[in-house]
Image (cartoon, rainbow, N blue to C red):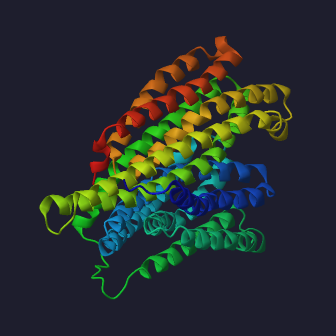
Amino acid sequence: MHLKPFHSIDKALISLSLPLLSTLLIEPLLVMADTFMIGRIGTAELAGLSLAATILSTVIGCCIFLAYSTTTSTAQLIGANQNQKALQYGIDALWVAGGLGIGLALALSLTSNTLLPVFTSNQEVIFHAQQYLQISALGIPGMLISLATSGILRGFSLPKIPLIISTIGALLNVPLNIIFIYGCDLGVAGAALGTALAQNFIAIFLIRAVIKLHIPSYKIRWFCTSAGVLRITKHSLPLFWRTIYLRLALLLQVATAAAFGADFLASNQILMATWNFAAYGLDALAGAAQILIGQSLGKYQSLICTHTTKQQQVSSTEVTNALNDVQAILDRCLRWGWWSGVIIGISFVPLSFVLPQLFSLNPLVQNITNISLWILGLGMPLASLSYLLDGILIGANDTRKLAKYMKYALLTFTPLASLLYVFASALNTNGFYLLWLSYCIGFMGVRSYTMLQRIKNPAWMQQS
């Protein structure tokens, strides 16, 4: 029986996930550069930056489907040896990303006057937040185009190209910020302008990298059509709803933590930052799984089609071998996911004695964070498994089921968090621990269980 050797799968996972991890860290570095420089100007400026950056990150986060759907579709077409169609799909995705980016940029610029007062009544903070939001909006088309182009290049198994270009862009952001913030004395507006220029620089050079994938034998249409837009929308809509459900769960978790008081909210920020940092590594692994699964399923589905229609001579042995390859990648990815979660979870134990003291001088915050990190460690294997399964099912284009499973997880978490919100004052510290147990075990457990049940049914391999 033909089967991909485990060492080749492991090598592919590592070679794909490391560049993906580095690329994922670029955007936080851009925000960190802005935060560091603006923090030295004043508190109101920093608060305005924080508010505007939160809104921007939410908007961009809801558009992550541009990267996911493009990676999956191009990877499957590459696996089916249809490189021309893969590039054509990517070009259509670029037009959708650009159009959506312009629309969102205009919407944020026009609604900032009414949107920002919802979050704060401090007029000085609103002034700085509006400055940052309106100017940073110029970078939204570039950010969304970067998501789509990165998806194309990953689908072609070229994750190092987005890494190199994004790194150069992040480094460029620093001198631009220095020039505009200090040299031109623009303050928050200068930080926004420098970041927007860096993001558009990244987008332009990523587009150039995609264009270089074209070879003379390809018959490429460089402008999108209504059919191309509809195809992208069909693939992307379930991923959009999946992201919305996930964002709602995160907002609910933070809102419930806030009900316990300022000390608990401070602890929650440390815990969520730690969780998100671990998630970067797991997301990179999930992205690698998405590419491998997408390419192997593309090959399998292509062989199934030709074997069934008899368009060319494809033996049942070739189909079986392709199916075995998919199963081998799946098994290996699940093993990587579980043990990565176990290792990260165990590492939270020693970190629980270091991180609380590092991030807070408040003894109560330190104590709450210390014990809560043990809960995070307990839930990390489930979370890791859910991230990997997420990547696998996105790679299979099984996104309708994925959106449904995320909704189930949200519906499970909502009543638990709501009860804790209502009884926060009575439950106090124990309630806060129950909140994180509900998120780590309840929310992540439902995600993992539903997706594990899905991959037991071969139907997940038949999506297109």
* Residue drawn at point x = 56 percent, y = 54 percent: 284
Looking at the image, residue 380 sits to the left or right of residue 112; the answer is: right
Could you tell me if residue 69 is visible in this image?
no
Q: Of 259 and 400, which appears nearest the observer?
A: 400
The residue that appears at 49% across and 52% down in the rendered structure is 59
On the image, the x and y values in percent for residue 255 come to 58, 30
Q: Quadrant of the C terminus?
A: bottom left
Q: Does 353 sit above or below residue 458?
A: above
**19 in relation to 417, above or below:** below
Q: Residue at x 39, y 69 (%)?
A: 94
Q: Nearer the viewer, residue 34 or 232?
A: 232
Q: Where in the figure is residue 445, as x and y percent of width and height?
A: 50, 29
Q: Residue furthest top?
A: 426
Kindly identify the residue that appears in the image at 32 percent across and 79 percent down.
222
Task: Give percent across and percent down for residue 57.
Answer: 56, 52
- For this orientation, the residue located farthest to the bottom is 216
Farthest residue, direction front:
1
- Please tell me in which quadrant of the rendered image residue 98 appears: bottom left
The number of callouts visible is 0
Image: 92 above or below 10: below
Vertical placement of residue 101 versus 64, above or below: below
Residue 49 visible within the image: yes
Q: Percent from the top left, x then y, of residue 150?
A: 49, 66
Left/right placement of residue 308 relative to residue 295 reads left
Q: Quadrant of residue 350?
A: top right
**463 relative position to 61: left or right:** left
